[in-house]
Image (cartoon, helix red, strand yellow):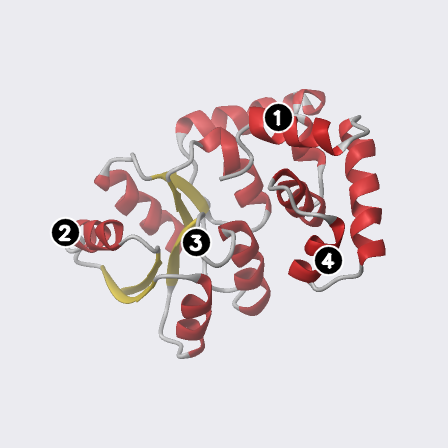
Amino acid sequence: MIRILIADDHLLIREGLKKVLKEAIDMRVVKEAVNAAEMLQTLKEGEIDLVVLDISLPDKSGLEVLQDLKRDYPKIPVLILSAHPEERFAVRALREGAAGYLTKESAPQELIQALRKIIQGRKYVSPSLAERLAIDVKNPGMKPPHETLSSREYQILRLVAAGKSSKEIAADLSISINTVNTYRSRMQEKMGMKTDAELIRYAIENHLID
């Protein structure tokens, strides 16, 4: 039996997932969490084989939570289930260690198929995402600028785009202001931009902020 933890702050989504998974005799939702803190606390109790993680949790970005999960529970696979389209976060999520990425518009049978594949130690991507990944490998120069950023640089990009100052970002991430400014300089250099206004406009145009 595959024991699943669902982390999503919407009751309707959690109930819908449980209903879908009742149709599968080999998997069961054993735990639920409404935010990142509750999910991480639940994982400490053990007895979880797989996590279904919403990318937009109220207390922490799903991508940040994914980093915590892969650091503390590297053997537990994670399926990202998101309201956001694949082109927005899927490549980044897979790079951060997700075993798969599905949108909430996916068919129920695709969800079950994805979970079974992931629990076998494999990756799950949709045909459209697989095609995009193949194009990226063949033509690495065609990647959008934000996909050249490291995890920390991307995190800071999103915080800058949300209007936060270096001081606020430093406090949020528990790092020094000088470190934040170093990351900002690297980020601007990689993306060919010189001002926060340019970064914010880019983030908005590419739907990188919630």
Give the SS element for disc 4: helix
Q: Is residue 68 visible?
A: yes
Q: Dot 2: what SS? A: loop
Q: Which mark is residue 57?
A: 3
Name the residue beneath numbered marker 2. Answer: 23
Foreground pick, 98 / 157: 157
- Checking the image for residue 170, the label placed there is 4
Label 4 crowding class (10 Å Cα cut-off): few <14, some 14-19, many 20+? some
Q: Amino acid at mark 1?
A: Asp
Q: Nearer the viewer, residue 90 or 39?
A: 39
Q: Is residue 1 visible?
A: no
The numbered mark, 3 or 4, whose residue comes first in the sequence reads 3
Which SS class for mark 3? loop
Q: CA distance from mark 2 to mark 4?
A: 46 Å
- Front residue (pair 4, 116): 4
Determine contact: label 2, label 1, CB under 8 Å. no
Pointer 3: residues within 10 angstroms few (<14), some, or many (20+)? many
The percent coordinates of residue 65 (x first, y second) are 52, 58
Q: Tags 2 and 4 in contact by the CB under 8 Å rule?
A: no
Q: CA distance from mark 3 to mark 2?
A: 27 Å
Disc 3 marks which amino acid? Leu
Query: Label 1: how many residues lie within 10 Å, few (<14), some (14-19) or many (20+)?
Result: some
**In this view, the mark in front (3 or 2):** 3
Instruction: Tell me where residue 34 appears, x and y as whole percent.
Output: 35, 61
Q: CA distance from mark 2 to mark 1?
A: 36 Å
Q: Which mark is residue 136?
A: 1
From the viewer's perspective, is the residue at label 3 or at label 4 nearer? Answer: 4
The CA span between labels 4 and 1 is 33 Å
Task: Give the mark toward the camera: 2 or 4.
Answer: 4
Q: Is residue 56 above or below residue 195?
A: below
Pointer 3 and pointer 4: residues touching (CB < 8 Å)? no
